[in-house]
Image: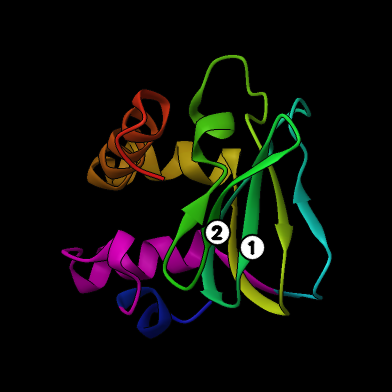
Amino acid sequence: MDAKQIEQMSLFSGLNKRERARVAQHADEVDVPEGKRLAREGDLAYEFFVIREGTADVDVGGEVKNELGPDDFFGEIGVLDEKRVRTATVTATSPMKLVVMSGHDLRALRRDIPQVIDKLRSACYDRISGGAS
């Protein structure tokens, strides 16, 4: 992935050029069609996603809890939590462009750029405590 694309995402704001290049090395961009299930509640979590384009619904226990759009991210709870279990089902409600990183990639970033993981952990805490979507 191109580091210039990383620069446009708020999750990675504040990173210097070298750090953005490092994130880009660990990220892939994928296109997904409308209706694609991206995560299933209760499944093991292997990937983390940032939405570049498109929208998705977040469903917990069979009820839609939130809609995600460009610059939102999901999957961090399952990837960062010790249990590694998805806490929600996420389904594309339009064609999407996603940035995807594996748990392995995030662990590498934790070593190299810990502030990215700090942001993800903060978002994780907000979502679990009900403070953010």
Q: Amino acid at mark 2?
A: Glu
User: Which corner quadrant of the image does residue 22 belong to?
Assistant: bottom left
Q: Residue at x 76, y 36 (%)?
A: 62
Of residue 116 and residue 17, the one placed in the foreground of this image is 116
Tell me residue 74's x, y (percent).
53, 49
Characterize the local packing of mark 1: few (<14), some (14-19) or many (20 or more) Cα atoms within 10 angstroms. Answer: many
Tell me residue 95's x, y (percent).
73, 80
Of residue 126 and residue 114, the one placed in the foreground of this image is 126
Q: Residue at x 16, y 64 (%)?
A: 14
**Which quadrant of the rendered structure holds the C terminus?**
top left
Q: Which residue is mark 1?
A: 56
| Label 1: which secondary element | strand
Q: Residue furthest front?
A: 63
**Rendered image: mark on residue 64:** none
User: Which corner quadrant of the image does residue 119 belong to?
Assistant: top left
Classify residue 133 as left or right of residue 125: right
| Label 2: which secondary element | strand
- CB within 8 Å, label 1 to label 2: yes
Tell me residue 86's x, y (percent).
67, 31
Q: Residue at x 81, y 76 (%)?
A: 33
Tell me residue 53's x, y (percent).
56, 80
Count of numbered tags: 2
Q: Amino acid at mark 1?
A: Ala
**Which quadrant of the rendered structure holds the N terminus?**
bottom right
Characterize the local packing of mark 2: few (<14), some (14-19) or many (20 or more) Cα atoms within 10 angstroms. Answer: some
Q: Is 80 contained in the magenta span? A: no
- The Cα atoms of the two marked residues, 1 and 2, are separated by 6 Å
Give the residues in magenta: 8-30
**Rendered image: mark on residue 67:** 2
N-terminal of the two: label 1 or label 2?
1
Q: Residue at x 20, y 63 (%)?
A: 15
Q: Residue furthest top?
A: 83
